[in-house]
């Protein structure tokens, strides 16, 4: 069976060929050719260069495995997993849940966003293009995200669904204002420890920021690691605020960073 979901807000067209396992669908993203600045829909897939390719639905596990490795020490991804009411959980079970969550998140972005990789799944980026989100029931169902209602502990659910997701959503809306639906959103990026320092992160980010520059759009991210803002500043992002998750014993903070588009080497809108 082939289904086509056409977004009402962009020209993104997703053609899904169902397999017996709904998570083994084959998804193709079809973009249009050229775009006026903010007057036309964004490209679903900016032109692929530098060995970057789009991750297909059949590859979601490899992409999620890369992110799981990259985020192995990240306080934010462990926040809904390592909870006081699951203190008995073995390291193996914690890791399995960590990988499972990233598989759902990766698959959601394959369905509704853009997932790119480089090398042998050495680095992976999850993007939400302007005007897109993964909040609809169909995506929650198809990605497996709904299972977190049963897989997370009561405290894990409070952290993830009641605190974390609304905080990210509200912070992005408040930070970008009217531009919230017009900006590129870098939701996750990770490079395997064995592949770090080879320029993969730069390539994956610039693949989209070049497009964002051409469209005159901002790019938004939340940095979950204190070391990363200085890396993102090298790509033109600036920290605009810091938010905090309140339910852990120690502070878990995120830097909210925005990159304004550059036009001919200058920031968009500047004289
Ligand atoms: C952050 C991360 C994605 C960077 O990936 P990477 O592929 O190693 O980065 P690159 O090799 O493309 O380097 C990008 C730039 O940052 C600089 N950089 C990389 N690591 C750095 C470090 N530890 N300290 C300072 N600068 C660093 C590089 O010099 C490069 O700048 P340049 O191109 O101007 O020389 C990677 O370290 C990672 O996956 N970390 C764990 C997961 C994570 O924190 N993800 C982001 C969550 S917000």
Image: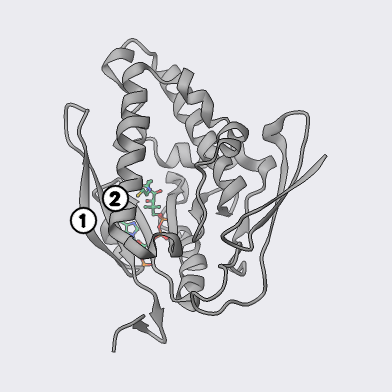
**Residue at image coords 57%, 54%:** 116
Residue 266, percent across and down?
34, 84
Q: Classify the position of ligand 1 by quadrant: top left, top right, bottom left or bottom right.
A: bottom left
Residue 248, percent across and down?
21, 28
Q: Which mark is residue 241?
A: 1
Q: Which mark is residue 151?
A: none
Front-most of 116 and 213?
213
Q: Are marks 2 and 1 in contact (CB under 8 Å)?
A: yes
Say which element carries label 1.
Answer: strand
Front-most of 54 and 8?
8
Pointer 1 local density, CA inside 10 Å: few below 14, some 14–19, many at least 20 = few
Residue on which disc 2 sits: 171
| Residue 147 in the image: above or below residue 55 | above
Residue 161, percent across and down?
37, 31
Any part of residue 113 in sight: yes
Q: Is residue 201 left or right of residue 171?
A: right
Task: Work out which quarter of the rendered image holds the C terminus and state it.
Answer: bottom left
| Residue 125 in the image: above or below residue 82 | below
Residue 11, percent across and down?
64, 63
* Cα–Cα gap, marks 2 and 1: 9 Å
Any part of residue 92 in sight: no
Q: Is residue 76 left or right of residue 41?
A: left
């Amino acid at each position: 069976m082939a289904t086509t979901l056409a977004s009402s807000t962009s020209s993104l067209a997703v053609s899904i060929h169902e397999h017996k396992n709904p998570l083994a669908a084959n998804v193709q993203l079809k973009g249009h050719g050229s775009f006026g600045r903010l007057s036309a829909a964004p490209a679903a897939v900016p032109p692929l260069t530098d060995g970057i390719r789009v991750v297909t639905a059949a590859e979601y596990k490899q992409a999620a495995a890369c992110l799981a490795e990259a985020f192995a020490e990240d306080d934010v991804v462990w926040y809904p997993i390592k909870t006081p009411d699951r203190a008995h959980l073995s390291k193996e079970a914690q890791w399995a849940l960590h990988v499972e969550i990233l598989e759902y998140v990766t698959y959601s972005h394959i369905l509704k966003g853009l997932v790119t990789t480089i090398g042998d799944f050495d680095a992976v980026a999850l993007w939400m293009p302007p005007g897109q989100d993964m909040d609809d029931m169909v995506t929650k169902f198809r990605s497996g995200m709904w299972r977190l209602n049963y897989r997370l502990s009561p405290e894990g659910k409070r952290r993830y669904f009641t605190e974390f997701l609304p905080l990210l959503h509200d912070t992005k809306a408040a930070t970008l204002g009217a531009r919230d639906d017009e900006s590129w959103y870098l939701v996750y990026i990770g490079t395997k420890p064995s592949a770090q320092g080879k320029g993969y992160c730069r390539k994956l980010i610039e693949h989209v920021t070049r497009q964002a520059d051409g469209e005159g759009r901002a790019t938004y991210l939340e940095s979950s690691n204190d070391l990363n803002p200085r890396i993102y500043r090298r790509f033109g992002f600036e920290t605009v605020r810091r938010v905090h998750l309140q339910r852990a014993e120690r502070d878990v903070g995120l830097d909210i960073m925005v990159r304004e588009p550059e036009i001919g080497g200058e920031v968009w809108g500047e004289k």
